[in-house]
Image (cartoon, grey):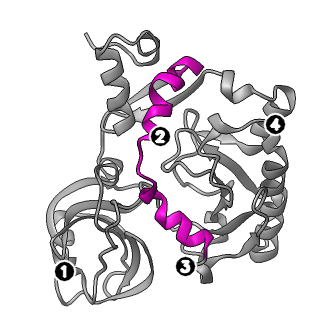
């Protein structure tokens, strides 16, 4: 999911069919992943709709967004809801109301590589994170408090300091074990990303790695040596979470400049307790990402850290 809700606004859902979605424009198409991202409205609120199927033409998109395409809701949580359509084997993920972050994430933009020093993090990224409204994590809190998606949990360690919940990610329909994609979300609220981790968090990290692997094997029969277990930096939302993905899966987000193996994170903290407060971390950003805009604003203001972080535009 990721990107969070909008203030205190309640999520808007489809009541019966895809014809309720009023298309404004196609944000992007992923032919390899058989996905299309659409910008439009549902019930007068801005929405991003992701549809999955084999091949996408403009005619195919228009042909689905009609009252005759009935949908069955799988679940809803804050601004997120998921449906299966009765035509064409389509799976629909609706985010409504949609923030600028949601729209940007679904839109294709050129990418850049950021080399973020500790000073750059303090000057740009940390203030950016601290300015994000807490309400954007409401869907995460709903999961942790079992107000939503409780039936989807496959494991929980309820300890407030080291515990976590584990569930299938929305990217995976559960049908093909080689495409397995699960997500662990920690219970504690004070760890937002890699940058917050110290050696004090090693018991939590070891528990997520070991217990999470065991839970995936018990539930799906997938052994530890068939799983990549990693965290993202930058993450799509700033509450610490860990990805469990089958090594055969073709899911995105596993490339250098995004994914950090949890076993490597643990080793780095064992060798240097303050590693992630001191290290330069490289990551990719799209030019439409709000964090990219924050870096650009910092550079325009003459920030020294920014000069080395982003490639200069002449």
In the foreground, 261 or 203: 203
Specify which label sits upstream in the sequence, 4 or 1.
1
Q: CA distance from mark 3 to mark 1?
A: 26 Å
Query: For mark 1, does the 10 Å Cα neighbourhood hold few (<14), some (14 to 19), or many (20 or more) residues?
Result: some
* Residues shaded magenta: 116-145
> Is 43 drawn above or below residue 124 in the view shown?
below
Q: Few, some or many C-alpha atoms within 10 Å of disc 2 (few <14, some 14-19, many ≥20)?
A: few
Residue contact at pointers 4 and 2, CB within 8 angstroms: no
Q: Nearer the viewer, mark 3 or mark 1?
A: 3
Pick whichever, 246 or 191, lies toward us: 191
Query: Does residue 207 belong to the magenta stretch?
Result: no
Q: Is residue 172 visible?
A: no
Viewed as shown, does residue 99 lie left or right of 136?
left
Q: Which mark is in front, 4 or 1? A: 4
Q: Which residue is mark 1?
A: 20
Q: Are marks 1 and 2 in contact (CB under 8 Å)?
A: no
Nearer the N terminus, badge 2 or badge 3? 2
Q: Nearer the viewer, mark 4 or mark 2?
A: 2
Q: Which residue is labeled 2 in the image? A: 130
Q: Tell me: residue 103, above or below residue 312.
A: below
- From the image, tell me which residue sits under label 4: 199
Q: Is residue 127 magenta?
A: yes
Q: Left or right of 92: which side holds 211?
A: right
Tally of numbered tags: 4
Residue 171 position (above or below residue 299): below
């Amino acid at each position: 999911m990721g990107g969070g809700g909008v203030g205190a606004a309640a999520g808007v859902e489809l009541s019966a069919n895809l014809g309720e979605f009023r298309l404004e424009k196609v944000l992007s198409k992923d032919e390899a992943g058989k996905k299309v991202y659409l910008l439009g409205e549902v019930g007068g609120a801005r929405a991003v709709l992701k549809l999955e199927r084999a091949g996408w033409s403009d005619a195919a998109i228009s042909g689905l967004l009609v009252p005759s395409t009935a949908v069955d809701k799988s679940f809803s949580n804050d601004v997120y809801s998921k449906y299966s359509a009765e035509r064409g084997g389509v799976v629909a993920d609706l985010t409504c109301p949609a923030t600028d972050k949601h729209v940007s994430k679904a839109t294709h933009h050129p990418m850049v590589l950021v080399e973020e020093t500790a000073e750059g993090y303090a000057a740009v990224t940390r203030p950016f994170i601290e300015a994000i409204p807490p309400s954007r994590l409401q869907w995460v809190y709903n999961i942790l408090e079992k107000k939503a998606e409780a039936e989807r949990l496959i494991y929980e360690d309820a300890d407030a300091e080291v515990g976590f919940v584990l569930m299938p990610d929305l990217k995976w329909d559960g049908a093909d074990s080689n495409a397995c994609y699960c997500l662990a979300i920690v219970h504690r609220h004070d760890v937002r990303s890699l940058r917050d981790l110290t050696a004090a968090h090693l018991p939590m990290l070891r528990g997520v790695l070991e217990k999470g692997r065991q839970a995936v094997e018990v539930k799906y029969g997938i052994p530890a040596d068939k799983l990549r277990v990693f965290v993202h930096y930058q993450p799509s939302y700033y509450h610490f979470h860990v990805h469990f993905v089958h090594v055969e899966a073709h899911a995105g987000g596993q490339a250098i400049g995004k994914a950090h193996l949890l076993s490597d994170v643990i080793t780095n903290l064992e060798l240097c307790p303050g590693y992630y407060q001191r290290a330069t971390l490289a990551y990719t950003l799209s030019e439409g990402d709000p964090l990219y805009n924050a870096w650009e604003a910092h550079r325009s203001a003459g920030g020294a850290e920014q000069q080395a972080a982003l490639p200069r535009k002449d």
